[in-house]
Amino acid sequence: MSNSESGAEIGVSSSDASTDTEGVEGAFRWEPTSVFDRLLLAAHAVARDNVRYIAVAAVALVVVTNVSVGLAGMFLSPLVGAFTLVSLIPALLVAVYIWESNPLDKTFSVGVAGAYFLGVLFCGLAYVLNTAAQPYFAAFPVGTALFFFVFVGPVEETVKLAAAYLSGYDSRLFRGAIDGAAYGAFAALGFVTAENALYLVGDGIFTASPLLGTLVARAGVGPAHVIWSAIAGYYLGLAKTTPSYTVPVVLKGVIIAAVLHATYNTFVTYRGALAESLDVAVSADVASTVVYAVFLLPFYVGIWLLLERLVRRYRRAYAEHGLPEPEDPTQSVPGDSDDPSPLASTALGTIVSLLSR
C-alpha cells in the first residue's frame, strides 16, 4: 500500500470519526458549547474544590438564622428583651462565681468572650438537631425520656463543650481544669442567652403563653446549664494536662453533664404525671409545683456540691503544687507550646484548621 493510499485511508477515517462525534453530540455525549455550559462547569469546579467551606457556610447559615429569630424578637418587644436579660441573671452569677474561683490570673480574655458568642451560635445548631431528631423517638413507650438521655443531653453538652474548646483550648490562658470550667461556664451562658431568647420570644410574641411563667422557668434552668457545662469544661481542662487520656477524660465530663441534663429535663417533663399519681387533695397545678420544688432544691444542691468539690480540689492542688504540669515530663507547661493540641485530629480540630486557613 502506498503512502498516498494510507494517507487517503487515514483521512477518511478521521472524517468518519468527526462525523460520528457530531452525530452522538447531545444524544450520547455532552460537551460545553455555550456560555451557559461553561458557567456550569466553572460553578462545578468551585463547588468541588471548596465543598468543605460550603458545608461549614450552610451550617452557619442555619445556626445564625435560628438565633437571629430569637434576637430579633427581643428587639421587636422591649418587654421580651427585658425578661430575657432578667432570666440570665442567675446563670451569670454562677458563671462569675466560677470565674472568680480561679486562683490564677483572672484577666477576661478574648477566648472567654469567644466561648460566650460560640455558645450563642451553637444553641441554634442544637435546636436544629433536636428538632430533626425528636420525631424518631415518638414511637417508643418512653420516647421523651429516651430522647433526653440519648440525644438532647449529649448533643447540647457536646456543642457547649465544643464552644469552650474552639475558643480557648490552645490558648496560653487555658492552663488546666479550672480554666476549662470557666470557659465551659461562659459557653453555657451564651447558649442560655440564645435559648432563653427563643423561648421568651416564642411565648411572648408568637403564642399566648404566660410570659412570667416562662421567665421563671428559664431563670431556673439557666444556672443548671452553666453548672453542667462547667463540670464538663473542668474535665476538658484536665484532659489538657493528661494528654495520654484525652478522649476518655473529655468523654467522662460530657457523660456526667449529659446525664444530669437529661435527668433534669425528664423530671420537668413528667412532673405533672408524677403529681397526679400521688393522689393528693390539691389541684393538679399546686401538686405539680410542689413536686417540682421538692425535686429542684436537692437537685441544685447536689450539682452545686459536685462542682464545688471539683473547684476546691483544684484550688487545694494549686496551693500545694502551683501550676499543673503535664504528665509527660518531656512536654512543656500547658499553653507554652505551639504544637497541635491532643484533639487536633478530631472533627473539632478539623474545623479549627479549616477556618484558620
Image: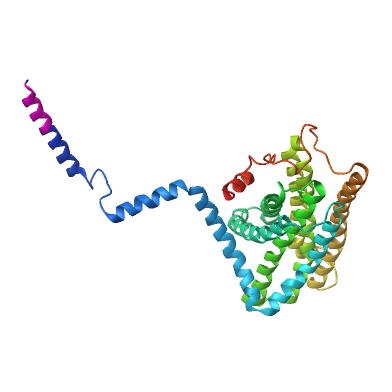
Quarter location, residue 224: bottom right
Which sits in the foreground, 102 or 128?
Answer: 102
How many badges with numbers are in the image?
0
In the image, is 33 to the left or to the right of 92? left
In the image, is 251 to the left or to the right of 17? right
Q: The N terminus lies in which quarter of the figure? A: top left
In the image, is 350 to the left or to the right of 319? left
Q: How is the image coloured?
A: rainbow
Q: Position of residue 33 (x, y in %)?
A: 25, 50
Q: Position of residue 291 (x, y in %)?
A: 83, 65
Q: Residue at x 74, y 72 (%)?
A: 85
Main SS category, magenta section: helix
Above or below, comparing residue 188 to residue 343 in the picture: below
Q: Is residue 325 visible?
A: yes
In the image, is 226 to the left or to the right of 304? left
Above or below, comparing residue 215 to residue 105 in the picture: below
Which sits in the foreground, 75 or 145?
Answer: 75
Q: Is residue 9 magenta?
A: yes
Magenta residues, start to end? 2-11
Which sits in the foreground, 159 or 319?
Answer: 319
Which residue ends up furthest to the top in the rendered image? 1
Above or below, comparing residue 75 to residue 98 in the picture: below
Q: Residue at x 89, y 49 (%)?
A: 315
Q: Residue at x 79, y 64 (%)?
A: 92
Q: Is residue 247 magenta?
A: no
Q: Position of residue 240 (x, y in %)?
A: 76, 42
Q: Is residue 142 visible?
A: no
Q: Position of residue 147 (x, y in %)?
A: 67, 54
